[in-house]
Image (cartoon, helix red, strand yellow):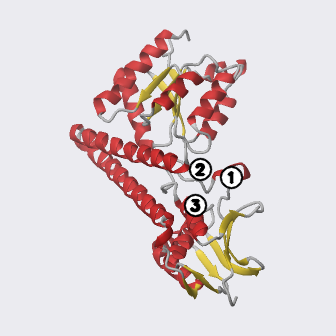
Amino acid sequence: MDEMQRFLQSAVHDLRAGLRRTGISAELLLHAEQQEREAVAAQLLQGLAKSEELLTGISRYATALAPGGYAIQLFSSSSAVRFALAHLEGEIRETGAKISVGDLPEIAGDRDRLADLFEHLIGNALKFRGSHPPAVEIGARRVPEGWVFSVKDNGIGIEPKYRDRLFMPFRRLHGAEVPGSGLGLATCKRILDAHRGRIWIEDGGPSGATFSFVLPATDGD
Amino acid sequence: MTEHKTRILLAEDNDGDVFLVRRALEKRGISHELVVAHNGEEALAWLDGHSGEVHRDSTPHLILLDLNLPRIDGAQLLSHIRKSDWFSRTPVIVLTSSDSPKDRQMALELGANLYFRKPTDLKSFMDLGRIVDETLKSVPI
């Protein structure tokens, strides 16, 4: 089975599961006693939000896949980080996260897609936080190959045995209790593929996770 | 006389489906103790911690297994269960949203007693209570 077929099957499976739960919740609501109604309605709305989240994930993944859809230009990578942080403003406030951004270079790439990439990585750092408020460090360093960016957090980390599957679509490490479509890191990989870059997770210390990615240098770098 | 409770391990990551399984068991009047594992790794750890003669009183009588689980999927878990000395004969009902004939065949080949495709309506979902009841009666506890 090729990757696209697997992707479609998983997407259909998850959407069908969401529809099934929503339908059953609606039935439950019809028959629910007065005191049960609020809980069942909350369950129904939660199911709808989950389906919406999945559709957003699929749409972003599809956008990342489109080879002709990338508008490559020179821009300051700090603006992509700024966009990402603006989108995550609510989560940053809610979690009390401290975000530090180092000096970031000018790069060639699609600013919107790279903003999506930073949003996924920073968003994960907030989502998989530990008992302390998240502390996220974003930086870049020059290497012969280009620029290596890193997003480092103090969260729950990722066990080494699960790292090989992290960038595959729909390979979630957490159940429905943690929000997410299961497509975030797969989308990041696709965005980097389109930029001839690559992404990986660093062998970390005792806690937290560091995601790094490299973007090839452009002429004049 | 103490009431006999059926111990069931449910490996299911979605709380909405946990709620429905619980409701189906209650509706059928099955006096039960439900242990819920939200991913395959949690289920495996629980099973490993409840195997052997010393744990006879807390061994599950039945395992309900979702196929699409985080970390360790249902198929891997089922394979582990069937290879285990202690759980190889514990009845397993696979619960899944998948309509793929391949998944069904795989689950049965791996040793599932039954394959229950999660229905899209409440009444059919509640039928799970009857299926659990019949499965338990067909296997000596």
Looking at the rendered structure, which numbered label has been put on residue A213?
Answer: none
Question: What residue type is disc 2 on?
Answer: Leu
Q: Nearer the viewer, mark 1 or mark 2?
A: 1
Q: Nearer the viewer, residue A146 or A152?
A: A146
Subunit that carries the residue with mark 2: A
Looking at the rendered structure, which numbered label has been put on residue A185?
Answer: 3
Q: Which residue is mark 1?
A: A164
Q: Is residue A153 visible?
A: no
Q: Which residue is mark 2?
A: A173
Local secondary structure at mark 1: helix
Local secondary structure at mark 2: loop
Indicate the position of residue B29 as horizontal and vertical percent values: 37, 20
Q: Residues within 10 Å of mark 2 (few under 14, many from 20)?
A: many
Indicate the position of residue A127 as horizontal and vertical percent values: 55, 62
Question: What residue type is disc 3 on?
Answer: Leu
Q: Nearer the viewer, residue B94 or A24?
A: B94
Q: Residue furthest front?
A: A68
> Could you tell me which quadrant the C terminus of chain B lies in?
top right
Question: What residue type is disc 1 on?
Answer: Asp
Subunit that carries the residue with mark 1: A
